[in-house]
Image: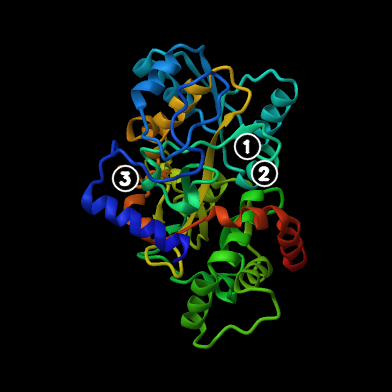
Amino acid sequence: MDTFARTRNRRHLATVAGLALGALLLGGCAGGAATVGPAQQAPSSATEPFDLEALVAAAAAEGPITIYDSTSKIESMAEAFSAKYGIKATGVKVDAAEAIEKVTREAQAKNVVGDVVAISDLPALKNQLLPNNFVRSWVPADIADNIDAGMRDPLVLITDPSFWTYNTESYSSCPADNMWALTTPEFSGKVAYQDPVGDNGALDWYSQLAAFGEDGLQAAYQEQFGEKLVTTQDSAAAEWVARMAKNNPILSKSSEEASEAVGAPGQTDPPMGLMSSAKLRNIEEKGYALGVCEGMKPWVGKAAPKAIAIATGSKSPHAAELFVHFAMTAEGIEPQINDGKISANSAILQPEDPAHVADHLEQLFYFDNAGLDSDWANRESWLDLWRTSHG
């Protein structure tokens, strides 16, 4: 069963059954149960019962912590953590590239400032930070069973969905219902799309599609064109990428640019676009006319992961673990999922947001950590494919 199906099924069960967040689990997981021994002790085995009270007590005996994340909402998360546990926490906004650099330099200098880091570049985390022992991934054992196996090593904090969208002022429904349709002459120059040049996240998406989305892309091709895909490319994903590049997309530098191109009012022939779910808040904030392409085949969008890890040299390792535990709960992650992010803890029910993410959980393409090494190794190849195919 692929990552999409596994995550979809977990989400469905969580919604129907309302799984409890505090279930005591004894099953194995990456990283193990809470550490309650000396400050630099490695986490204990996950076969031991998880003891949150012991972790809280150990954390309270340590100093303050700092958390790096790419969103300013980490500031309110840190404040909520401090209010709950009485442990000083400071959230600092840094982008993924800066976070990698800071964590690396701090570890090499043996002067750790960032005790916890949330980072969207999982291939770099897996292939640079973890092998060098700059950080470690720790999965709270009482939450582990609610986290898809493909999101545990390293631990995924949230996935950030991006949706295919259209202008609801100009169209009564999405003008396309298949990703392959976007590669046809009808949509030449009519798809706002983040430029993959300089965007590792886009390249990783292509790699993930090739590894885990082949069946979906093949089936969607046959549905769109009435015949099986025949290609000289290595995969259906590579064929789709090449065709998209050739079809004169409107390249943007951000989801904000894409939301304006698609949703700005008063247009007579607006493009479609791929953008972060958070940008649908521009409906209310800026008066944009944006709608999710319901039923888009094979996926209505993608859900890119952001991981959370602990600095190996942290002077407050238990407090860092406690923050990770907090961030994996509904209370802790609330500031981020309110604008459409999806917690990796499938027991957390999705709140209402402008993109209505809860209605699309089963229709998103989810990344699988099993592909991280390939994602890392193949970035240059995907970039070359895009560049040689693009007009």
Query: According to the image, label 1 marks what residue?
Result: 96
Q: Nearer the viewer, mark 3 or mark 1?
A: 3
* Category of crowding for the residue at label 3, using alpha-carbon neighbours closer than 10 angstroms: few (below 14), some (14–19), many (at least 20): many
* Category of crowding for the residue at label 1, using alpha-carbon neighbours closer than 10 angstroms: few (below 14), some (14–19), many (at least 20): many
Query: According to the image, label 3 marks what residue?
Result: 347
**Observer-nearest residue: 367 or 385?**
367
342 over 225 or under it: above or below: above
N-term-proximal mark, 2 vs 3: 2
N-term-proximal mark, 1 vs 2: 1
Alpha carbon separation for disc pair 3 and 1? 27 Å
Tell whether 97 sits left or right of 41. Answer: right
Residue at the image position 67 percent from the left and 58 percent from the top: 374
Q: Nearer the viewer, mark 1 or mark 2?
A: 2
Q: Disc 1 marks which amino acid? A: Ala
Q: Quadrant of residue 233?
A: bottom right
Alpha carbon separation for disc pair 2 and 3? 28 Å
237 over 155 or under it: above or below: below
**Observer-nearest residue: 328 or 235?**
328
Q: Disc 3 marks which amino acid? A: Ala
Q: Indicate the quadrant containing the C terminus: top left, top right, bottom left or bottom right.
A: bottom right
| Image location (x, y in percent) of residue 262 | 50, 54
Q: Are marks 1 and 2 in contact (CB under 8 Å)?
A: yes
Residue at the image position 39 percent from the left and 29 percent from the top: 326
